[in-house]
């Protein structure tokens, strides 16, 4: 009888390695953008990857606004800068670290992409569920993650900037009332990718231990003896992300 591994052989070991390498070496990028243009064939592949994300009810609520125009970007940059200046959310040192949000990426990178969610773009719902708009938003977030990973696989960095007055952004980009801007992304080639998140390097927060985020059968439920193996395995695999990032 075929093992599960054999049945799934359409994803080879090398494919799998490439996927994990992409996942663990993806970074949120701000400072390292180059102005090298993105070839259309590369952008096309990334947009297809984004468009093949899962979506609730297969509603595909996303649109992708490709923003190259420098005047538009200056307006967006000004709106983000204003939002950051007025948002004094964090005290002391955290404020200082947090304020280095490197909004320059909006102007420096090759392309800005605003990913939206059209809350009215529902397919006929095959089951009798009330309309839950968070599901629409989650779908647009899935498309962003696909885009982010595909961009990394193409050697492109992505930076997500999110602190902005939504109505101002909508006005600048002429986004209609029923459409929500979900993510504003800076996309472009970069000088290098950092190995760790900037916020981790800057001492904002450490990476949490995944073993503390896992519970069994109920919120914070402790494992039965037979279930504890996964916790031991996670401990044993603690170096997996770093090794996979190197492609080992
Ligand atoms: C929904 C969302 C919003 C974010 N907004 C911002 C932002 O406004 N400014 C910023 O510098 N980074 C933002 N980020 C990036 C995170 O800071 C970054 O993902 C996190 O520090 C982990 O780093 P990594 O993506 O390199 O692993 C955002 C990320 C997400 C998922």
Image (spheres, grey):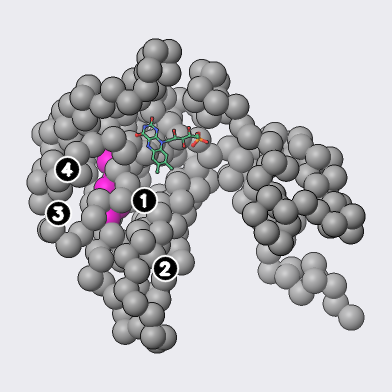
Q: CA distance from mark 2 to mark 4?
A: 24 Å
**Quadrant where the image shows the N terminus:** bottom right
Q: CA distance from mark 4 to mark 1?
A: 23 Å
Badge 1 is on which residue?
A: 43
Q: Which mark is residue 175?
A: 3
> Is label 1 in a helix, a strand or a loop?
helix
Badge 4 is on which residue?
A: 169
> Is label 3 in a helix, a strand or a loop?
loop
Badge 2 is on which residue?
A: 55
Q: Is residue 97 magenta?
A: no
Which is in the foreground here, disc 2 or disc 1?
2
Q: CA distance from mark 2 to mark 1?
A: 21 Å
Q: CA distance from mark 3 to mark 2?
A: 21 Å
**Percent from the top left, x then y, of residue 13?**
74, 56
Q: Is residue 221 left or right of residue 91?
A: right
**Percent from the top left, x then y, of residue 9?**
74, 68
Q: Nearer the viewer, residue 98 or 9?
A: 98
Q: Residue at x 43, y 13 (%)?
A: 93
**Percent from the top left, x then y, of residue 95?**
37, 18
Q: Is residue 211 left or right of residue 54?
A: right
Which is in the foreground here, disc 4 or disc 1?
4
Q: Earlier in the sequence, mark 1 or mark 3?
A: 1
Residue extent of the magenta highlight? 111-116
């Amino acid at each position: 009888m075929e093992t599960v591994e054999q049945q799934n052989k359409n994803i080879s070991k090398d494919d799998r390695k490439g996927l994990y390498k992409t996942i663990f070496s993806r970074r949120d990028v701000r400072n390292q953008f180059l102005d090298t243009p993105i070839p259309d064939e590369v952008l096309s592949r990334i947009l297809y990857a984004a468009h093949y994300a899962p979506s609730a009810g297969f509603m595909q609520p996303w649109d992708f606004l490709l923003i190259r125009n420098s005047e538009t970007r200056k307006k967006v940059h000004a709106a983000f800068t204003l939002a950051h200046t007025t948002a004094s959310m964090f005290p002391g040192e955290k404020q200082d670290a947090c304020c280095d949000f490197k909004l320059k990426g909006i102007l420096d990178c090759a392309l800005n992409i605003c990913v939206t969610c059209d809350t009215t773009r529902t397919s006929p719902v095959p089951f009798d569920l009330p309309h839950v708009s968070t599901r629409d938003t989650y779908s647009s977030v899935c498309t962003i993650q696909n885009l982010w990973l595909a961009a990394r696989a193409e050697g492109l960095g992505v930076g997500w900037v999110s602190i902005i007055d939504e109505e101002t952004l909508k006005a600048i980009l002429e986004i209609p009332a029923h459409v929500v801007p979900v993510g504003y992304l800076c996309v472009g080639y970069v000088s290098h990718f950092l190995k760790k998140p900037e916020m981790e390097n800057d001492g904002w927060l450490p990476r949490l231990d995944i073993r503390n985020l896992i519970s069994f059968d109920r919120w914070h439920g402790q494992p039965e003896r037979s279930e504890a193996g996964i916790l031991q395995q996670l401990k044993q695999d603690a170096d997996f992300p770093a090794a996979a990032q190197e492609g080992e």
